[in-house]
Amino acid sequence: MLFNSLEFAIFLPIVFLLYWYIFSKSYRWQNVFLLLASCFFYVCWDWKTLPLIVLTAFSTWLCGLEIYKARQTGTGKGTHWYQSKAGLISAANIILNLGILCVFKYYNFFAQSFADAFQFFGIHLGYTTLHLILPLGISYYTFRAISYSIDIYRGQMEPTRDFLSFFAFIIFFPLLLAGPIERARTMLGDFLRKRAFDKDLAVDGLRQILWGLFKKVVIADNCGQFVDKCFKANPSGLDASILWTAIVLFAFQLYADFSGCSDIAIGVSKLFGFRLKKNFSYPYFSRNMSEFWRRWHISLMSWFKDYLYIPLGGSRVGRWKTIRNIFIVFLVSGLWHGADWTFIFWGGLQAVFILPLVLLGSSKQYKNTVAEGRLLPSGKEVFSILTTFVVFCFGLIPVRSQTVGYAFQYFCSIFDPSFFTIPVGLKGNIVVFILIMLVIEWLQREKEHGLSDLKIKNKFLRYALYYALTICVFWFGGTQEAFIYMQF
């Protein structure tokens, strides 16, 4: 059941009406109903993997209670995590959850890579592949579960004894497809109190859903048609202008797809009384790669920062260890995105792009909004934005390539005199839709989303925009495609 499907368009209003009109007596009733609705949403994909998310939720909930108990009784103290009972319990929960993730998502990749490494030295190793269905949202709910036990171990939150509410948080259906990766310490509290209907919040949620659908259905799916054709062909047989057009369109496809999915998830959550943090903050208006990664997939990058980069020492442990830490974070991020060497290659490229900024001390240079308080950016800002976008596009080539070899072939083919030719096969409406998105998001770059608190005072014009976007979704929508980040 995709967010952009007819099934979801039927499912959501029914759940919304029952939630507020039948099950609004107490937060427990609300949570039980959300739990049932989320389980139904989950089993629509595959009921066989439902026990896995139940195991993750129950083991994490139980470990949270035991970690807190150990800390309260004094056995949670120790110089290192392995010197305390609380640390060992937390480590056991992390190993269990990562173990489940690795078996279902990474076993075949590691088994094949291990065998290929020995084959390089002339040693043949036989291995067995597992034909497993990747559980829906496993990369996202696993990270939510891990952060819960770590935060309790660190003393940053107390556990809940209400398992049903905790399970409702873990399996909350708007977050299953592609996040955001909300943490228990910021969201679980909303599950432990009665939610009252907020009309303004719900209306803003509908606007955000509309904006997310426009980006996904109109922009991402239509860009994908051109991109798919190009990346199925041999890059050496295509003009460089077509190759560059394909990778630029893929950049917009990826952004519109993923940020669109996040907008829909956040908007749907608002309908049920939940305020989630922004997951994208207009990254294509970034002035360097460091700013870009503070604005792209914010929930994931902040997760890696808090639970991997800072525990490794961050940038305060000397030059070489800082380099090590940056590469670890981005290589792991690449592996999180996909079980393939192309994603690891992509992660390594991102580390190379951001490393000079960290070493030169300019990684935190831009913390404000570009052209803040002004309508148009300066010439320097335009140059910085375009340069950052081109660097990001260049780094995306491995992500869309079938193999690392194909990526290198693509790299070599884009630097060719045919770059100055006119790309064939590009539809003009795609360019128009991308420009519409960029203009609206530029004007709204200091707001939560593209349609948040519009400055259009004329009610007729404001609703005309809403209707125009809705018509575009139905009229110019491409084929119903799954969200790209679902595979991650």
Image (spheres, rainbow, N blue to C red):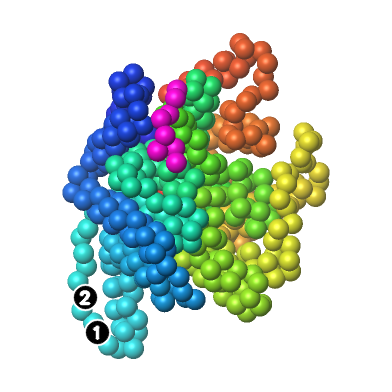
Q: Residues within 10 Å of mark 2 (few under 14, many from 20)?
A: few
Residue 196 on the magenta span:
yes
Question: Contact (CB < 8 A) between labels 1 and 2?
Answer: no
Distance in Å between CA atoms under marks 1 and 2? 10 Å
Residue displayed at 24% across by 84% down: 124
Question: Residue 185 location in percent, x, y?
Answer: 47, 48
Question: Residue 53 location in percent, x, y?
Answer: 27, 51
Total numbered badges shown on the rendered structure:
2
**Segment colored magenta:** 189-197
**189 sits to left or right of 369:** left
Q: Nearer the viewer, residue 417 or 252?
A: 252
**58 sits to left or right of 80:** left
Q: Nearer the viewer, residue 422 or 105?
A: 105
Please tell me the numbered disc located at residue 124.
Answer: 1
Q: Nearer the viewer, residue 242 or 173?
A: 173
**145 sits to left or right of 313:** left
Residue 473 vs 360, above or below: the answer is: above
Q: Nearer the viewer, residue 80 or 19?
A: 80
Residue 289 vs 460, above or below: the answer is: below
Q: Residues within 10 Å of mark 1 (few under 14, many from 20)?
A: few
Q: Specify the quadrant of the image occupied by residue 265.
A: top left
Residue 350 vs 113, above or below: the answer is: above
Question: Residue 112 location in percent, x, y?
Answer: 29, 73
Residue displayed at 34% across by 66% down: 89
Query: What residue is disc 2 on?
Result: 127
Residue at far top of view: 460
Secondary structure under the numbered disc 2 in the rendered image: loop
Residue 372 on the magenta span:
no
In the rendered image, the quadrant that contains the C terminus is bottom left
Does the rendering let one see residue 226?
no
